[in-house]
Image (spheres, rainbow, N blue to C red):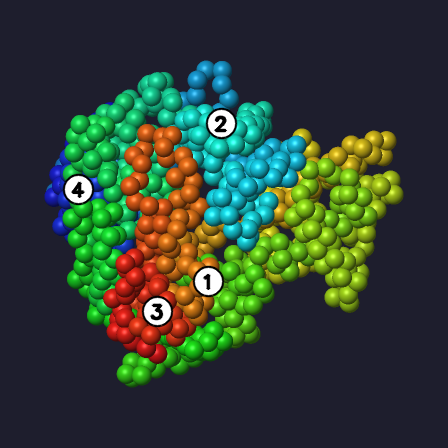
Amino acid sequence: MAIACMITLQDFYRNYEKFRYLPNEEQKQALEAPPDQPLFVVAGPGTGKTTCLTLRILKLILVDGLAPESILATTFTKKAAEELRSRILGWGFLLLEELDRDPDLPDTTKAQLRKLDINQILTGTLDSLCEQILRDYREPGTQPPILIDEFVSKTLMLREGLFKDQRYRNGELEQFLLAFQNNNRFGFNTGKKNDYLLQLWDRQFQDQVDWESFLGSLEKPEVADTLREIMQDYRAALDEELMVDFAILEQTLLERLRENKIPEFTDKIQAVLVDEYQDSNLLQERIYFELSQVSQAALTVVGDDDQSLYRFRGATVELFSRFDERHHEFFEEMPKTVFLRTNYRSTENIIEFVNDYVTLDRQYQEVRVQSKPPLIAGGNAEQGLPILGMFRENLDELATDLADFIEKVFRGNGYRLPNGELIQCAEDGGDVGDCALLCSSPKEQKYNGDLRLPGLLREKFGDRLSVFNPRGQTLTEEPRVALLGGLLLEALDGDGLITENTRGLDNDSLTTFGNWRDEAIDYLRSPNASQSLKDFIDGWANRQTNPAWKRSVPVLDLIYAITHFFPEFYDDPEGQVFLEVFTRQLSASEQVSKFKGRVLWEPENPDLSNASVRALLRNFLSPIASGSVGVNEELMDTFPRDRLSIISIHQAKGLEFPLVIVDVGSEFKSNHHTQAFKRFPRQEGTPQIIENMVRTHTNLDTDTRSGGDRCFDDLYRQYFVAYSRPQEILLLVGLDSALPRSNRPIPNVALGWQRTGQSEWLDAFPFYSI
């Protein structure tokens, strides 16, 4: 599959330098490695890993002579995959243009270069590539896989797993699932049960679990029987519709690789490159290893164990931190380890702070990649402002001062520090979108209705500034969601009789339906409702009396007709996200229901008409009303420039902002045990509990660290990620009571506490107070 080498490395660098800076010496170690050299690239935040990957791919083609179609490169998210492909094509075409103009290259070489089609490089997420491979190289007589998204999988598990045979009322199953959150009933609803069942389903494949061995280990055989039935029913529903979810898709590819059933694909692969490898699971590792082995292609993995945040999605960080050993065990060859340590994102002060923070906890060093060097600043990095800290006596005062700070920086004449330095938004193109507030959770209210910092900020801004925080509301209670849901119910089932006679709806859904209806009825009776809207809803509710009514109407038409009366679903970025939840869930309903998301009206067969509405209640509205589906990260891949983005630290991974505000203690007034999981965990959380349950039934080594230690490690990584997001300014915010002082200790990972119970920041804070 190799083609003749076309240019030298010197040619490559000479022409690349015409439009971009040359790679640094660290990046060159990975870039210049021979094509058959496996690589373990440990890339700290802001060190140019995407640049490194892009240049290695282009060098493999232009210098080493690999055909573009022989290179496969994957990354973790769709957004990251799009960025990687954009760079490969953008820089690749620029480089080809420069090479074509290079007077030192012979015409024969230029003619070869003009024939190259770098569009043939295979890039994408692992799931998208699995889908493409299994579609393009499927066995004769088989159908291509129909890959479902999270909305469909949650809908099917809810319908086939919980609602079928009213399993959501099974007390023993409930008690088993409740153990996943340490028997704490707070927030334990139908949506949570559904999430835990899907996590177990995914773990079967992700950790390559011996499922029958796992079921046999459960204390209660009746729970094992119920779980077996749930998983069988979910799988049967997928098979009936010829669908696969992500776990089955990856498992299918692994099996075909092990059996060497796609040689027409594997024979042409000569290089496999994986970005964000720290978020891989055992199933994915097996795919990469088997693909590399059968194709004899060298494997390059890039990532950072300190930025592994997805244990709750099945990621196993040890696969990255021990990649060199695991690669040697499988291939009997050690990969070359390359450390990328030069940070081009942040100021010197931020880099120094991040380096100090990540080495505070002594025990954490045991789980990091061995011999990992500290970050260093790029040559053009400025010293920058000191790390800032805003801590106040109470939450209202903190929110007031923080809102004032943000408004002065982005809408006023700047914020003057006590030392005289001015913080001000860039005049050319700067806006409040250059700032983000990172929180452990972006929720705006506590369970008792009291506002948290994100909610208070929204209130303090008033009409002066806006926030973007669609994940901050409880979706089912968000006013726009409740109104739209209620109007849909009123239109579909005006008298509520179909809802009353629909089996399989849980109490959470029915309660939410009632609240939504009340919201819609109150609105329709108010002077705010136009007569046109009232007539429209009334027309739908009484469609059986209209002889001209269409026999089949897509509910998508109904949604768009209703939202036509509410511009906030189109003009407001948060409203757009809420609307997309409804449209995405309707799309899921179309895939799993024989009525395909349509309302039927057959005067001679009212039972059929009612059945179409019942299907919508079960498959469309109930998953939203029960909390089983909601706003996920995929629905928020862009952020409005004119709003303050409030996002979780998990969601911030891979992002960067000039100014980052990190909430490190706005809720911590005392050392209360109920908040320990947010600041200083001593016991395991849900991911660790599930790991403990299934790990002994896999080929993975049993983790010698306790679940509490692993939970501590994960929270430590979260704040490392948070502190490494800013380019210019890092501001820590919280209550005075949260600060590490000897007279009132509130242990907090984010504020320098080691798991030994000591804080390196005790009465000596590494930030400048404002």
| Residue appearing at x 35%, y 78% in the figure | 770
- Look at mark 4 in the image and give the residue it sits on: 337
| Residue appearing at x 16%, y 48% in the figure | 371
Number of other residues with Cα within 10 Å of mark 4, as a class: few under 14, some 14 to 19, many 20 or more: some
Which of disc 4 and disc 1 is earlier in sequence?
A: 4
Q: Image check: 417 left or right of 521?
A: left
Question: Label 1 to label 2, Cα distance in Å?
Answer: 37 Å
- Look at mark 3 in the image and give the residue it sits on: 745
| Residue appearing at x 19%, y 31% in the figure | 328
Q: Image check: 379 left or right of 284?
A: left
Mark toward the viewer: 1 or 2: 1
Q: Are marks 1 and 2 in contact (CB under 8 Å)?
A: no
Mark 4 secondary-structure assignment: strand
Question: Label 4 to label 3, Cα distance in Å?
Answer: 41 Å
Which of disc 3 and disc 4 is earlier in sequence?
A: 4
Question: Label 3 to label 2, Cα distance in Å?
Answer: 55 Å
The kind of residue on which mark 4 rests is Thr
Question: Label 1 to label 4, Cα distance in Å?
Answer: 37 Å
The kind of residue on which mark 1 rests is Ile
Residue 190 x/y as whole percent: 59, 45
Mark toward the viewer: 4 or 3: 3
Q: Are marks 4 and 2 in contact (CB under 8 Å)?
A: no
Q: Please determine whether, in this image, residue 95 is positioned above or below residue 730.
A: above
The kind of residue on which mark 3 rests is Pro
